[in-house]
Image (tube, rainbow, N blue to C red):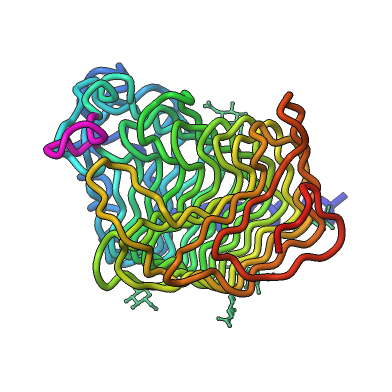
Amino acid sequence: MALPIFLSMILVVLATQVHAQIKEYDIRKYGARADGKTDNSKVILNVWNIACQAKGRNLVYIPPGVFMTTAVRLKGPCNGQMLFQIKGVLKASSDPQLGIDNWISFQWMEELTVFGHGTFDGQGAYAWPYNNCKESSSCELLPTTLRLDFVNNSRIHHVNFTNSKNGHMSLLACHNVQIDHIRISAPADSPNTDGIKIAYSSGINIFSSDIGCGDDCIALLPGSWNVNITGVACGPGHGISVGSLGGTQQEQDVNGLLVQNCTFSGTLNGVRIKTKTSSYPGIVSNITFQHLTMRNVYNPIIIDQKYCPFRSCAGGASQIQISGVIFKNIHGISNSQLAINLLCSKSRPCERLELDNIDLVYEGREGPAKAQCINAKGVSYGTQKPPKCF
Ligand SMILES: *[C@@H]1O[C@H](CO)[C@@H](O)[C@H](O)[C@H]1NC(C)=O
Ligand SMILES: *[C@@H]1O[C@H](CO)[C@@H](O)[C@H](O)[C@H]1NC(C)=O
Ligand SMILES: *[C@@H]1O[C@H](CO)[C@@H](O)[C@H](O)[C@H]1NC(C)=O
Ligand SMILES: *[C@@H]1O[C@H](CO)[C@@H](O)[C@H](O)[C@H]1NC(C)=O
Ligand SMILES: *[C@@H]1O[C@H](CO)[C@@H](O)[C@H](O)[C@H]1NC(C)=O
């Protein structure tokens, strides 16, 4: 009898010690109100700053309930390790927030964890009517839901994002960040609501996530190095894209991307590399897209080096060199006859492309699926449906 009691006492002591290692800062205890209306940004910032000063492991806790907040910039470096647990809903302002670049941002820190099964609700519907960048040169800047700048060795997991005003998540100059078990949802026709954008970052590992939005599910922008994407369900949306690239001078290259075991459902593109016509120089290399399922995807495999979103594109060929891209074990249904479109640059033809075991079916009246290769050099292996073009 004495022994089990003794053991359970040890367990209780151990459990309290483990718990005691994390100091919790509940925003409600500092005056946050879960009425969905009061702006809690000052409280959240204040709680963050208190937690960030403390040593050890510090947890900023967003309890169940709907907490409205306008933009907050949560800055490091912190004296300890920061955890941001969102159990409830962080709700953005119903004001469109024109001219504000980010809603919640984390900057300059190491070992941040954002988790908690709660939701970042960007209230995008109030801002989308102001998204007129396609028509106007003086268009309004709208806030990205979650921004990470200069954040290293961190993890974002088990959180939901919905209806961002602009993109849902954006990483700039981050290293070794894991993003897993997240869910992003916004309507297919919501403008520029990209899922995750990555730029000037390396060692990014995204897996087991569900992304549906009105733009790219994931976009790899200049300076994306060593990025793995595994087990992502994308749709609706514009697929997983490298680019667009070549739009500005001195862009860093994109190197080392592995996209695998993903499904694309009802998306505009599956996997895409896009560079602007008449671009600045750059390199895209060492990319593998493998074990992918396409369900009614308009452009399952596409390289577009003549990307020109605005009417004002100058003529001339892209100066981005695409080299070493593998497409392997990709199957499913294409919603257009041109299931594979490799449209490369006349002045920098694509090199070392590989098509290995491709089985894409088109069921339309025009006839079976086709592939097009323009200025594209490479090899094909195994099954080739549509018939290979190099
Ligand atoms: C993050 O890592 C990069 C590259 O290793 C380093 O230059 C930067 O100072 C680090 N940032 C922080 C906030 O520690
Ligand atoms: C978050 O998404 C998960 C699915 O990944 C879902 O089960 C859960 O109900 C969502 N939570 C909220 C608060 O919407
Ligand atoms: C990506 O996967 C490759 C191959 O499995 C591995 O070597 C690399 O470390 C991974 N990178 C990240 C950021 O997880
Ligand atoms: C290709 O990318 C991987 C990371 O995914 C990296 O480890 C490797 O060094 C890269 N290879 C070349 C030749 O750049
Ligand atoms: C990806 O899918 C392939 C083929 O179904 C499978 O062999 C492989 O183990 C999967 N990889 C991961 C990381 O899930």
Q: Does the magenta portion include 45? A: no
Residue 152 x %, y %: 41, 67
> Residue visible at 65% across and 64% down?
288
Q: Is residue 74 above or below residue 350?
A: above
Quarter of image, res 310: top left
Percent from the top left, x then y, of residue 271? 59, 50
Secondary structure predominantly adopted by residues drawn in magenta: loop
Does any portion of residue 114 appear in the rendered image? yes
Which quadrant, please, contains the C terminus? bottom right
| Span of residues in magenta | 132-142
Residue 220 shown left or right of residue 31 in the figure: right
The residue that appears at 21% across and 25% down in the rendered structure is 130
Q: Is residue 20 visible?
A: no
Indicate left or right for 56 with 101 as reference.
right
x, y percent for residue 219: 46, 51
Name the quadrant containing residue 62. Answer: top left
Q: Residue at x 72, y 49 (%)?
A: 292
Name which quarter of the figure residue 67 lies in.
top left
- Where is residue 241? Give x, y as percent: 50, 51
Q: Is residue 186 above or below residue 4?
A: above
